[in-house]
Image (cartoon, rainbow, N blue to C red):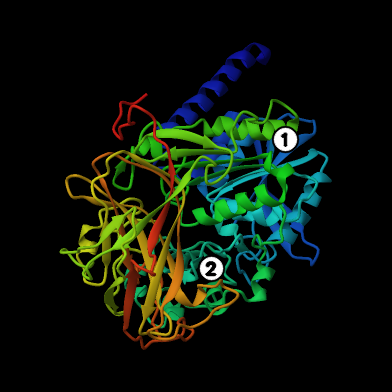
Amino acid sequence: MDLSALRPALAWWIVLVVALLALAAWVLRERIPAHWQQPLRALAFGVRIDNDVRIAMPDGTELAGTLYRPRGNQGALPTVYVRLPYDRRRYGEALGEGMFFARNGYAVLVQDVRGKFESQGDDFVPWRHATGDGVATLDWIVHQPWSNGKVGTIGCSALGELQYALARANHPAHAAMIPMAAGGAAGDVSGHAGYFGAFEGGVFQLASAAGWFSKHGMKAYHGAWPESLDMAPALPTLPVLDVVQRVRPGANAYQDFLQTSLGDPRWRDLDYIAEGDRPRVPSLVIDTWGDPSLSGTLAISESVRRHSPDAATNQHVVIAPGNHCEHELVNGMGRFGELPVYNADRPYRQWYLAWFDHWLRGRGDGLAKLPPYTFFVLNEQRWLTATQWPPAEAQMQAWYLGSRGRAHGRDSDGVLSLQASRDTRSDEYLYDPLKPVPSRGGPLCCTGDPKQVSGPADQREIEARDDVLTYTTAPLAAPLRIAGPLRAQLVVSSSAPDTDFVARLVHVWPDGRATSIQEGALRARYRDGVERPALMTPGKRYVLDVPMRSIAYLVPRGHRLRLDITSSSFPRLERNLNTGGRNYDESVPAQALNRIFHGGDALSFVELPVLETPVPEAHPFAAKR
């Protein structure tokens, strides 16, 4: 029997079967785990997957990787390198990037970091060894016969932070990177001491840090993390050092982070971007207004712009609406917290390819027309651009606090005005760490409470408390567009040797809603910087600068602005126990009578970078375009 006549038909049947399997996978993609779909997708897209790559580090530790390459390609390929602590074989983003770039003609190496999953190592602490291990891996890549000697890196959150850790080395093969929501890579840089995004103004970001370390921070555990942990009842635990142990006992990097004081030189061993680092790798930087580590992203990008002008010409920063790592999703979601969002889509996937095609293949212009900063203005539904951050055109505008001495509760007489009062007055409140102000929205994550939401959220319930001060403008006579970093200068005193101050800018709508715009905090002992902690003298006045993150936001005419001042936001932030001690290993708190002075010689204000608005006024609910 002549089988040659059957070969064309057999080939068509194979194509049909593959197509049907691909269609079935597409229809059931929400029910089938991504790692189960990967072999079929590889077959459909002509990608070869090798899950058994082992790369030896200089100290003999072997790191495990998966290599994706286009089938049938015998030439030298540019490489995309992705590192993660989340299991390269199962983590959706890693699987997606491996397939996306391999089907577009790249080799892709996805690697478990030291101490996680199939990589060796027994003392995981983020991001110890990250720079050296990354350099050794690049050295390995460029010596492979399939490599053209140029490597790009990509990834969000931890996958982005690891890119910055590598960029510190300025390895000649590290040709470009796309760090997303990666501000946690900032150590002590440009006055910002974040370290994994775990600290804000010297205050430990408890919910997000404890949630992450509970799942991923085990030092000598190489298996899958728990799908669910009972975080909500654990977060109030005192001392705060025991929070993670309560839900997942064992050696955990969480303890290292809490017990290493800010300003300690041991942080330099963890490969975060420091003031003296000069990363020059061409960078497409992407973040969102709701990211807890946004300040770190902007601190790094501005450090590059100031200290490495040549490198800055190859740096583009895009800030989208949304919460952590939601830049590709938020337009389809249509909301950011309680705000509607539209017109927010950007051609991200096209950008990624264009960026790497230029720097790794020598094709195209590498997004040369993309401005240094591209940012979405919330409530205006509009993208704007700038050459620096804050925009050079922004004018700093101070709104001064004032009251007749009763700025708390529902009957607050607190006002915000462009003119400071001539008379010095004050408002006081009692901060009790055992009755902290609850977190509502903002850069909130990982509380274990499904009722908690992130992003802009109504603050009226919070503002009704006696331990929250509120200062409100009159209805605005013209629209106010804010674009840049916010800060509150507060003249304060406390009955405690140390306490925290939390400042939140709020949008008050004509119907009474009071949705958060942006917020920040400062631990008073760090008022002169993390390297120079100093306790307060009870009753003495101090001038504090509370950093409140950046934002781009339009407040329409007739609406009002409000500044909320308090001393806690729990569980987003660790509670200051007011003792002046180490805080992390203490269990007995003290109450603090905290006072805000304003008027006269006590200039307390919130400073806003204001951009001129278009004429006619851009309405926040303008038609989609």
- In what quadrant of the picture does the N terminus appear? top right
Residue 468 position (above or below residue 350): below
Q: Residue furthest bottom?
A: 588
Specify the quadrant of the image occupied by residue 618.
Answer: top left
Question: What's the residue at 62%, 14% (across, down)?
Answer: 8
Q: Is residue 159 left or right of residue 439?
A: right
Specify the quadrant of the image occupied by residue 97.
Answer: top right
Q: Position of residue 62 (x, y in %)?
A: 73, 61
Q: Position of residue 169 (x, y in %)?
A: 75, 55
Nearer to me, 577 or 246: 577
* Kind of residue sitting beneath label 2: Gly
Residue under numbered circle 2: 217
Q: Residue furthest front?
A: 422
* Kind of residue sitting beneath label 1: Trp
SS at circle 2: loop
Badge 1: residue crowd in 10 Å (few <14, some 14–19, many ≥20): many
Q: Is residue 240 left or right of residue 616?
A: right
Residue 459 position (above or below residue 289): below
Specify the quadrant of the image occupied by residue 364.
Answer: top right
